[in-house]
Amino acid sequence: MSIPAASTIVMAICTAKLAVAQQTPGESLGNSAALEDRAKQQEAMPYTLKSGDFKLLVTPSLGFEWNDNINLSHDQAISDYIISPMLRLDGSYLFTSRNLVQFNIGVGYDKYIQHDEYSGIRLMSGSGISFDLYIKDFWINLHQNFQYTLDTAGQPDVANTGFYGGWNNTAGLSGTWDLEDVLLTLGYDHLNFVSSSSLFDYTDSATELLSARAGFRFGQRLTAGVEGSVGFTSYNQPVLNNNTAYNAGLYADWRDSYLEVKARAGYSFYDFKQTSVVIPAMNEDTWYADLELSHALTDALSYSLGAGHELRLGVQADVVEAWYLRPRVNWAFLKNWSLGASFSYENGKLGNSDLLGVTAEHYEWSGLTFGLARSVTSKLSLEVHYRLTVRSSDFAAREYTQNAVGLGVSYQFR
């Protein structure tokens, strides 16, 4: 989990990830065939409870994990066993053929057996509520996304602690005007981050984000155009510097029935105000680029790839500049069996001024995950996973290795 950064979330805001309204290439938002297909998808969704066009799927799960370095320490690693019960609710209500409400919420608890101070609630990544409204050629999406986790190993620029995490909440709306060959999108979001630990309460912040896109359809598969955003971030404490982030660039989306490619490139500029009593304010700027590719090779085998360069707000420094690579593959190699593997790599540099007493730390962070899942019945599923996280740095005390292995079981009431 990271503090919200305009350069990394503008894409998510503009495309309204929680919205279920998915277009096939070349179709307008109000196309009757697309609307009919969306209604069929909603009708095919599994459910525990159904009342008219309202559906609710209830999925409880229980996870067990062993972690050999919960505090991400270089030479004083602490291991522990973690039990994680969770309840997931997936609901939707198609109240007209054009308008849909959807929510996905997972609430759980991570219980550390030997070190209870690390225990805490957990919200499934991607939890949220989304509402799609169609008025002629306008698509309006209202959404609220929220997440509460304590997974410090997932924050590449943090080390020597297991307490970084907290509450991320995003609420906003976006509007898209479909002019057949032209798509115009405007978005507004309010983001709040509240740390789970007093050690990091200086990162508590609020961000106002405005974003815009103007795209042109080139044939049936390609949409490309310009994008921009501006974000205003303020902190509750005078430790990190308040700032305004500006981003502007180009984007292109290409897709067919099996392959989807999204590309973005542009420039980011952060204007920092001297609100910190610790860190001297220094403006930062650099280029950004992002490539996302997803490909279904067969019904059983698919893969995705993400790669790019970004400038984002930091945790122990005002900013982090980083390169990243994120490939993933999923393979349903036998009936009721599937194998997933993912790799994440980041090569980053903290800002010139930070809270660590070091200057411009360079680091490399890698995460490798394997997961094997088995559908025992149409309702009951089992999975085992292994995760390896390695961080290297030009400051040896901020290096660590973490291994985690776990088992999970879930059951869909339907």
Image (cartoon, grey):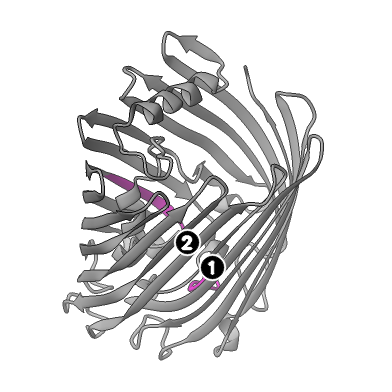
Q: Is residue 20 left or right of residue 393?
A: left
Q: Quadrant of residue 247?
A: bottom left
Residue 73 rendering spot, x and y as whole percentages: 62, 73
Please determine whether, in this image, residue 108 is positioned above or below residue 330: above
Name the residue that disc number 1 marks.
161
Q: Quadrant of residue 335?
A: top right
Foreground residue among 248 and 218: 218
Disc 1, disc 2: CB below 8 Å?
A: yes
Foreground residue among 170 and 224: 224
Element at label 2: loop
Pointer 1: residues within 10 angstroms few (<14), some, or many (20+)? Answer: some
Residue 112 rendering spot, x and y as whole percentages: 64, 48
Q: Which mark is residue 164?
A: 2
* Residue at the outermost front position: 219
Q: Is residue 168 magenta?
A: yes
Please determine whether, in this image, residue 337 is positioned above or below residue 230: above
Please determine whether, in this image, residue 348 is positioned above or below residue 90: below
Q: Is residue 326 magenta?
A: no
Please determine whether, in this image, residue 78 is positioned above or below residue 279: above
The amino acid marked with disc number 1 is: Thr
Residue 195 rendering spot, x and y as whole percentages: 38, 56
Pointer 2: residues within 10 angstroms few (<14), some, or many (20+)? Answer: many
Q: Which residues, given as a range, are shown in magenta? A: 156-171
Q: Quadrant of the C terminus?
A: top right
How many angstroms separate mark 1 from mark 2 (CA)? 7 Å
The amino acid marked with disc number 2 is: Tyr
Q: Which mark is residue 58?
A: none
From this viewpoint, is residue 406 visible?
no
Q: Quadrant of the N terminus?
A: bottom left
Element at label 1: loop
From this viewpoint, is residue 64 visible?
yes
